[in-house]
Image: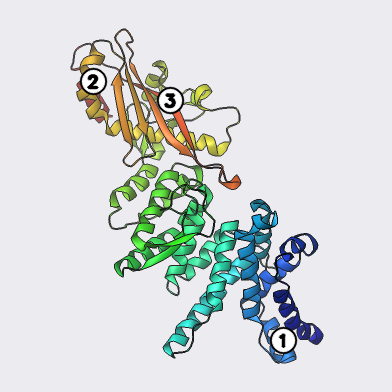
Amino acid sequence: TESWFESMGHFIQLIHAIMCRYWLSSVSSHDKQLLPFLGEAICWSQCCPDLVKGFQESWNKIVPHESIISVVCSISHTLSSEHQDYGMSKLKAYKLLKTIGAVGVAKDSELPAIAGMIRSYGVMCHGQAVQKDRDMPTFHPLDNLADVIQSLLSAGCVDKCVMRELVELRDICPEFVARCTVRILCEHPNVLSDSRFAGALRSGLLAATLSICAELGRQGIYILAPWRGVLGDDEEDDDDDESYYHSEELARGIVDQLYRIRLHHETHKVIPSMTLLNYRGLEDKWWYIFGDAKEYVCANCLGTFDREALKWCKGTHMLEPLCSSECFKASWDAGACADFRYVVKKDDDKRMISLKRNILQAGCKVFRDNFDRIVREYKQGMAHGQGLTMAIDLREFPPRVSSMLLPMGDPSKTGQVTLIAEDFRGFKVGVKGKVLELRKRFLIDFEEDVLGFQNLHAKQNKV
């Protein structure tokens, strides 16, 4: 109504005026509608053109956009950085921030408010570029809106819609897109999200960000990123601490984090369907990440095979792939199959079992790649009855392999291998990644003479 439009200008001014030290605690308990309303109000120009038109016709003024952004910026900064000063937990503060960013802003629409804010930011960036061409003063609310969006991303206002909106801005405000990507994927160096990395791959956000970093890197441009991001240490610094990093450093950091989480369920599932990304200086790591996800290696003969030939050892609840019935029987008879009882625990969910399956498969590939070295170093000792033990650290690039012979009197036709990886499934509750170790036995069937390993190697190549 006309009276509603008349009151809105005074309402916004009132909210701005009462922003003081005691206001935070009162709004959280007495007015749960205020924060969602302000989140909507930022996006009126994008999602509610009729509302904007009503302001112009009934109130004869524009929507008080700058005042709304200023208010929300003050609130988001207080919630994200100063919540402890008011006796509020970080969990509660982030919950309030989510009410600003996650509310739908258009009728019959799933569009979250933060997506509308990102669109508004793009429009404002375009307007700022026009102002610069005309030697006009810059639009100061732009920085405030960027800070609001960063706070909402830190609070968890992230989904596929948000990622797609950011991709649309890659040519308009590339530095902002790269800054947001770091917030989404790598804000905390040891708290990574499988679903976010998978979403960034599917939406094209990760590829767009690497392209941006490459272009800005050639120009020598630095990007503002969280201090505890991919290049920060693991100290408990303030959430808003940021510093400028060279674009290429950020790109390397993002790829490093993708490498760490590559074996998790959703990320590992989506990687084979993606086009191989190239980035200067990171070609080897990219080939490893993409090749590792696309290739199947038999857990018995270590030969590469197509998915159509895939067979599973049902005794291990399909933990390890095998290429043929012969390999299935050989691995089972030798007791080399990964024992489900020792690998999988009672409380393991689907994602954990998938992670362990991917770790076992990655371990097979590393063992295969190091087979020749193992033959050269240990064939004499194993031919005389010594067992072999190995450790493969999948966290490092390339995976670090250490091995040694066991004392005499412990002969075995299998080699005991410990696979070391990371488990980041505690992202939703802020739990840091944990070291995850699995043990696997590989069949090493050889003759008593020193040519035994050569015969095995020839058989492996034939298969």
Provide residue 308's location: percent of width, then percent of height.
Answer: 41, 38
Q: Position of residue 20 (x, y in %)?
A: 70, 69
Q: Which residue is mark 2?
A: 378
Measure the C-alpha gap from mark 1 to mark 2.
82 Å
In the displayed structure, 336 sits above or below 255; it is above
Q: Earlier in the sequence, mark 1 or mark 3?
A: 1
Would you say 455 lies left or right of 388 here? left
Q: Residue at coordinates 32% horizontally, 35% vertically from top-left? A: 400
Numbered badge on residue 54: 1
Instruction: Indicate the amino acid at tag 3.
Output: Arg
Q: Which mark is residue 439?
A: 3
Query: In the figure, 105 relative to 412: above or below?
Result: below
Instruction: Quadrant for the C terminus, please.
Output: top left
**Helix, strand, or loop for circle 3?**
strand
Near mark 1 (Cα within 10 A), the count class, few <14, some 14-19 or many ≥20, is some
Q: Quadrant of residue 103?
A: bottom right
